Image (spheres, rainbow, N blue to C red):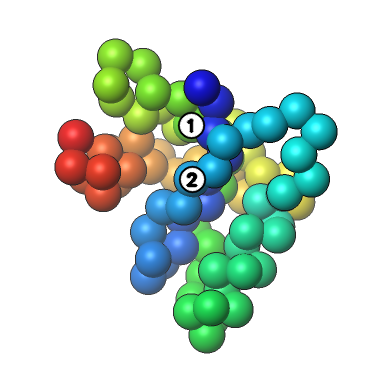
Amino acid sequence: MEMKYIRHEEQGFILWPVVDGDPLWHKHMGHLVTEKCHGGRILSAGFVRFINGKPVCYGESISLELTKHPDDNVALAQQLGI
């Protein structure tokens, strides 16, 4: 299953499923997270798939004008404890 993600500097990774016709953009989620956290930065954003149980981050967020960070795969795996 393909998922979208953002990586917040304090909250870590937030993942949600990609659904056809889903209007929830990276920008929307980024705004919700930064508002709830009273700030903080979104460090990276894109898409993720799990291959053989490991996260593989790829792509970009056009709405946030951010791409994946080189260490997103490792950092997400650590956050998930895998």
Residue at 68% across, 31% down:
19
**Residue that protrudes farthest toward the bottom in the picture:** 38
**For the residues marked 2 and 1, what is the alpha-carbon distance in whole angstroms?**
8 Å
Task: Where is residue 53? Give x, y as percent.
Answer: 28, 21
Q: Is residue 34 visible?
A: yes
Residue at 52% across, 85% down:
38
Label 1, secondary structure: give it: strand
Of the image marks 2 and 1, the number of the one nearer the N terminus: 2
Q: Is residue 43 left or right of residue 76?
A: right
Task: Check disc 1: other Cα within 10 Å, few if <14, some if 14-19, many if 20+.
Answer: many
**Residue that protrudes farthest toward the left in the picture:** 81
Q: Can you say whether 21 is above or below 41 in the image?
A: above
User: Nearest the camera: 42 or 14?
Assistant: 14
Quarter where residue 20 is shown: top right
Q: Is residue 69 left or right of residue 53?
A: right
Query: Mark 2 sits on what residue?
Result: 15
Quarter where residue 64 is shown: bottom right
Q: Can you say whether 35 is above or below 21 in the image?
A: below
Task: Where is residue 25? Give x, y as percent.
Answer: 72, 49
Residue at 62% across, 69% down:
32
Task: Say which mark, if any, is on residue 48.
Answer: 1
User: Nearest the camera: 55 or 32?
Assistant: 32
In the rendered image, which quarter contains the C terminus? Answer: top left
Task: Where is residue 34? Give x, y as percent.
Answer: 56, 74
**Residue that protrudes farthest toward the top in the picture:** 52
